[in-house]
């Protein structure tokens, strides 16, 4: 089990952007596919307070439900990539 969980939807271009960054940084993660219907996305809503995807949880760094692909990509780069301290 990985420390990072990605909530995603198949065919979602924003999710693909995050997955590409995870692959580029060689980060293991668990994928949770969400239903197409926003009304059925209760699990991701409990985690992030909203029903949009992508959303990540990073237990190692106490990130509970970060949304917005640009924010996630920036976070991953700063935390795990060349921006890491």
Image: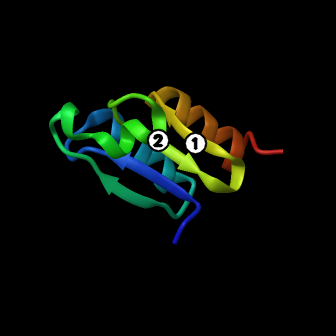
State the image coordinates of residue 16 (x, y, percent, origin top left): 33, 42
Return the residue found at the far bottom: 1
Marks 2/1: CA–CA distance: 7 Å
Q: Quadrant of residue 11?
A: top left
Choose between 64 and 56: the one closer to the eye.
64
Comparing 47 with 27, the one in front is 47
Q: Left or right: 38 with respect to 76? A: left
Mark 1 neighbour class, 10 Å CA radius: few under 14, some 14 to 19, many 20 or more: some
The colour scheme used here is: rainbow
| Horizontal side, residue 47 vs residue 34: left or right | right
Marks 2,1: beta carbons within 8 A: yes
Q: Secondary structure at mark 1?
A: strand
- Residue 33 pos. (x, y %): 28, 52
Could you tell me which residue is drawn at 47 percent across and 56 percent down? 23
Residue located at (60% from left, 32% from top): 74
Question: How packed is label 2: few (under 14 Cα within 10 Å), some, or many (20 or more)?
Answer: some
Query: Going by the picture, which residue comes out furthest to the left?
Result: 37
User: Residue 79 placed where, x, y %?
Assistant: 70, 44
Which residue is denoted by mark 2 in the rendering? 47
Residue under numbered circle 1: 64
Viewer-proximal residue, 45 or 13?
A: 45
- Report which quarter residue 18 is drawn in: top left
Judge from the rendering whether residue 79 lies leftward or rightward of residue 38; answer left or right.
Answer: right
The numbered mark, 2 or 1, whose residue comes first in the sequence reads 2
């Amino acid at each position: 089990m990985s420390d990072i969980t990605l909530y995603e939807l198949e065919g979602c271009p924003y999710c693909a952007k995050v997955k590409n960054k995870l692959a580029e940084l060689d980060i293991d993660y668990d994928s949770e596919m969400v239903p197409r219907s926003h009304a059925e996305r209760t699990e991701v809503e409990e985690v992030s307070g909203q029903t949009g995807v992508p959303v990540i949880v990073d237990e190692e760094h106490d990130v509970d439900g970060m949304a917005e692909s640009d924010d996630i990509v920036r976070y991953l780069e700063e935390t795990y990539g060349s921006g890491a301290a």
